[in-house]
Amino acid sequence: MKVGQREALLSTFARPLVDELACANDPAVLARPLTYCVTRCGGPPGGRPVIGNNGHTGSAVGTNRRRDERVGVGGRMRRLLTAAGTALALGVGGVACTSGEEEHEQFVGAGEVCGGLFSGPSAEMVEKVTGHKVFFWRSGNGMQEVVAALKDGYASGRSWAPGANLCRLSPKGAKQTDRGGITYSMYAPQDVEDEGLPAGAELYTMGVQSSVRRSGASIYFECVSPQLKGSDKAPLRIQGGFGRGESDAPDTREYRDMNMRILHAATLKLVKELDCEDNGGLPKVPVLTPK
């Protein structure tokens, strides 16, 4: 199916669905696969962002609608989704697009997910620790979202602040528990002072504090940057975490170290974006020494 035909068919089924979901003014919708429209436009534009089961960001549906309106929308939704299934069977859903209409495959290898975050040696390690080779495509926007969240948290003056997801790893055909990824946030000083660890975790010597476990790894470090006013006196405290999701990979030193190598490689990219002095105190080559 040609691109023009695909877009025309997508518009035929997506437009009424968009109208039902009150997001007709979202220009990104018709450049996305229909499944994106369903989750992205879960309510009126400008609503509270939420994460759906498939990992896409959507909007919180208002809770003050009358029950009969909800029932009516639900019935129309089912009919529209049935029609959408026909469209997808005809080839609409095989390719997804960014807002700039650049086409990409719906499923990609570990080295292509999240804008190539895991390109190079990290890709093979991700495949090994997750037990999967094919993942849902994710954009590379996670980095700018993490940087913005950390800067906002630092500017708030609070001792800690929530961060953002750098990358979500959703294997093809995986269950909810199979999903993993990397997140960053701003931690409070007491978070490392008590050295509380999950069961089965062990401390490493890298950073302010780092640890590995069967299911992932964590690292704490500090960032002094010209992008963060006052950080020369009070550094931004960053905690990073990698989780591999449900996996049958063995619990060995090799695999625990791979968890940390994956997180360390991604963290070096983050400190570069933040312009942290001395890589935030992290070595260019990960130090995998138990404490």
Image (cartoon, grey):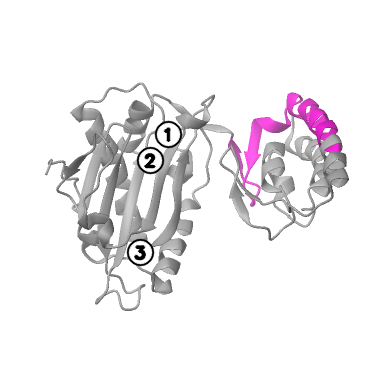
Residue picked out by circle 3? 274
**Quick one: 122 or 255, which is closer to the camera?**
255
Q: Amino acid at mark 3?
A: Leu
Q: Is residue 26 left or right of residue 19?
A: left
Q: Residue at x 52, y 42 (%)?
A: 138
Q: CA distance from mark 3 to mark 1?
A: 24 Å
Residue 255 is one of the magenta-drawn residues: no
Q: Is residue 288 left or right of residue 5?
A: left
Category of crowding for the residue at label 2, using alpha-carbon neighbours closer than 10 angstroms: few (below 14), some (14–19), many (at least 20): many
Q: Residue at x 11, y 44 (%)?
A: 291
Q: CA distance from mark 3 to mark 2?
A: 19 Å
Q: Report if the CB atoms under discs 1 and 2 are less than 8 Å apart.
A: yes
Instruction: Provide the secondary structure element on which disc 2 rests.
Output: loop
Which label sits on residue 118?
Answer: 2
Q: Quadrant of the N terminus?
A: top right
Residue picked out by circle 1? 110
To which quarter of the image does residue 10 belong? top right
To which quarter of the image does residue 200 belong? top left
Which label sits on residue 49?
Answer: none
The span shown in magenta is 76-105
**Quick one: 33 or 252, which is closer to the camera?**
252
Q: Amino acid at mark 2?
A: Phe
Q: Amino acid at mark 1?
A: Ala
